[in-house]
Amino acid sequence: MDKNHFRASIKPSQLAGKLSYELLAEKLQLELGLKKPPSRFTFTKYDEIKHAFDLKKEQLRQKKSEAIQDAKCLFESTDKLSDLISNLGNDDVAIAELIKQVEKLEKENERLNSENKRLNSQNDMLLERFARWQYNLQKMDGVDLNKLVSTLDDGLPAKSK
């Protein structure tokens, strides 16, 4: 494989995003008009190619890590999704991380809505019970509601150790 032809056929912008030996082999097959794609072992025979591949993989990992951190910072620093998206740009990794964060927030929102409905229902039930008890106490002979309220409003006794 001619190294100069390899360098000329693959531009750095073409290797943005996901990178694997399989994707690189497919791209080379298309660019060079090969009958079958080169194997991973073919690439690793050439130290220059292996080094360039490893370097690019590390750059992509670093870019992804930075995008994830940036997305997390955006989520922590603002409460408006529109502000977050306006600061986004055109970065697939950041978009993917933001989608994960939005999905996480949606699940949390569903959980909180469900909990809110449960608590509202429980509150309504307790208010109804209180009203029923109050009504029934008023009907009882010898029950002074003012005295009962003052007794019921006393705090709980302190816990003994």
Image (spheres, rainbow, N blue to C red):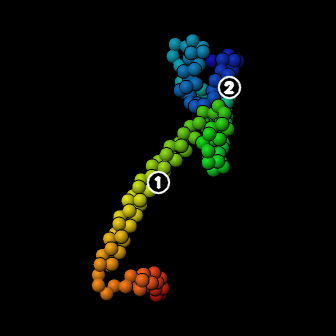
Picture coordinates of residue 32, whole percent (x, y): 60, 14
> Residue drawn 56% across and 15% down?
30
Callout 2: 10 Å neighbours few (<14), some, many (20+)? few
Q: Which residue is mark 1?
A: 112
Left of 101 or right of it: where is 7?
right
Give how far across and how far down residue 92 sits, in percent.
60, 33
Residue sitting nearer the eye, 41 or 144 = 144
Report the residue at 69% width, 17% height from top. Answer: 8
Name the residue that disc number 2 marks. Answer: 12
Q: Nearer the viewer, residue 99 or 156?
A: 156
Q: Is 64 in front, or is 149?
A: 149
Query: Closer to the N terminus: mark 1 or mark 2?
Result: 2
Q: CA distance from mark 1 to mark 2?
A: 45 Å
Q: Is the residue 52 above or below the residue 141 in the image?
A: above
Residue found 42% across the figure and 83% down from its top:
146
Q: Is residue 151 left or right of residue 12?
A: left
Q: Is residue 26 above or below residue 47?
A: above
Three-letter amino acid code of the residue under disc 2: Pro
Viewer-side residue, 118 vs 100: 118
Residue type pointed to by label 1: Leu
- Crowd tier of the residue under label 1, counting other residues whose Cα lies within 10 Å: few below 14, some 14–19, many 20 or above: few
Q: Quadrant of residue 25?
A: top right
* Image quarter of the N terminus: top right
Q: Position of residue 127 (x, y in %)?
A: 38, 67
Q: Quadrant of residue 59?
A: top right
Residue depicted at 35% across the width and 64% down the height = 125
- Under circle 1, the secondary element is helix
Residue 61 pos. (x, y %): 62, 39
